[in-house]
Image (spheres, rainbow, N blue to C red):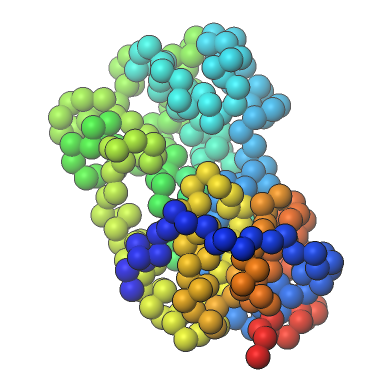
């Protein structure tokens, strides 16, 4: 199956916020997961935020104080905004990005919320589709062959103009850069250059038309398509975690489209405040507006206790 056939920029037209009591929603979600033949996780930024990788507030000011002082709080509002700042030199650009990669990708160990998600699915066939670039799924124990990270990885760099289709592991380089930063700059000798065209390098992040989809990316895309093929006619749960409306055409809208074409599949949508689900999906969809760190733990507990409500399907 070509997974790209499900890419969609069109949301369902019958969104509702379910009024079912929270405890009942948790039981329904646990029941769906306990009876699932397989689980497809769709994870967005809300999952990492709930796990503790917050891009603003105290975590930002503590790690980027010198950058805020140098470039001003208007430009350095949070880590997301700072990533788009037009740094005047390569030394300054990599001074920022090495710090960003270090605090969000390299330094953090497997976070408890990600470990709980792994525990929820580790006993059955599963696959992860994620727009997150912080490598947490790998750290939590998911196998590389079961992950498709569509938007890149904070640990990889590429030619800024994509002159060739290869990415490079830069985690060790970022550690050294971060240690060498002075006055928001790295030494000129540490600035990476493309080994092919000798031009500048960039983070392997989907932020412009030069994003490199390397061999590993295409292999992961193929495995995702294979997983969808195997799931046809089986009880697949689409477990959507923290996916909002930043890049909904990759996970949120495609999941809704899949649900419309596969009557055996179910959707569990967990989101702090955007868990509306298509009303037409009826009992096959559970939408829980709650802190993910809370509801994932509650669902996991209900799964262990076997308190889930049946299969969650209407006959």
- Vertical placement of residue 157 versus 269, above or below: above
- Please tell me which residue lies in front, 177 or 213: 213
Residue 244 x, y percent position in the rendering: 59, 49
Please report the residue visible at 71 percent of the width from the left and 50 percent of the height from the top.
272
Please report the residue visible at 40 percent of the width from the left and 45 percent of the height from the top.
152
Asked which quadrant contains residue 312, the reply is bottom right
Residue 305 x, y percent position in the rendering: 80, 78
Judge whether residue 63 can be spotted in this image: no
Please report the residue visible at 30 percent of the width from the left and 17 percent of the height from the top.
189
- Please tell me which residue lies in front, 150 or 147: 150
Numbered label tally? 0
Judge whether residue 88 can be spotted in this image: yes
Please report the residue visible at 80 percent of the width from the left and 68 percent of the height from the top.
20
Specify whether 132 is left or right of 269: left
Residue lying at the far front in this picture: please name it.
13
Residue 274 x, y percent position in the rendering: 66, 52
- Please tell me which residue lies in front, 304 or 82: 82
- Vertical placement of residue 111 versus 154, above or below: below
Residue 52 x, y percent position in the rendering: 67, 42
- Quarter of the figure that contains the N terminus: bottom left
- Quarter of the figure that contains the C terminus: bottom right
- Vertical placement of residue 154 versus 305, above or below: above
Residue lying at the far left in this picture: please name it.
197
Specify whether 212 is left or right of 240: left
């Amino acid at each position: 199956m070509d997974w790209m056939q499900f890419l969609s920029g069109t949301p369902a037209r019958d969104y509702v916020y379910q009024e079912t009591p929270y405890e009942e929603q948790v039981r329904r979600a646990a029941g769906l997961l306990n009876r699932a033949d397989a689980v497809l996780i769709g994870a967005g930024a809300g999952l990492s935020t709930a796990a503790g990788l917050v891009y603003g507030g105290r975590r930002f000011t503590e790690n980027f104080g010198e950058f805020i002082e140098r470039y001003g709080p208007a430009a350095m509002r949070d880590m997301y905004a700072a990533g788009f700042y037009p740094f005047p030199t390569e030394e300054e650009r990599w001074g920022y990005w090495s710090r960003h990669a270090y605090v969000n990708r390299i330094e953090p160990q497997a976070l408890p919320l990600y470990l709980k998600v792994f525990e929820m699915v580790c006993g059955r066939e599963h696959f992860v589709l994620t727009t997150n670039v912080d490598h947490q799924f790998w750290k939590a124990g998911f196998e590389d062959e079961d992950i498709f990270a569509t938007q890149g990885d904070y640990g990889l760099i590429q030619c800024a103009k994509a002159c060739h289709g290869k990415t490079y592991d830069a985690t060790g380089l970022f550690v050294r850069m971060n240690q060498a930063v002075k006055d928001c700059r790295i030494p000129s000798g540490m600035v990476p250059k493309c080994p092919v065209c000798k031009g500048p390098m960039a983070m392997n992040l989907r932020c412009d038309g030069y994003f490199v989809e390397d061999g590993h990316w295409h292999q992961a895309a193929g495995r995702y398509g294979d997983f969808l093929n195997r799931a046809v006619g089986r009880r697949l749960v689409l477990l959507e975690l923290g996916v909002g409306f930043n890049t909904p055409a990759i996970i949120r809208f495609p999941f809704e489209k899949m649900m419309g074409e596969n009557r055996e599949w179910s959707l569990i949508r967990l989101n702090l405040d955007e868990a509306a689900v298509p009303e037409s999906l009826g009992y096959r969809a559970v939408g829980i507006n709650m802190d993910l760190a809370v509801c994932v733990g509650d669902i996991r507990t209900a799964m262990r206790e076997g308190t889930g409500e049946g299969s969650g399907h209407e006959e």
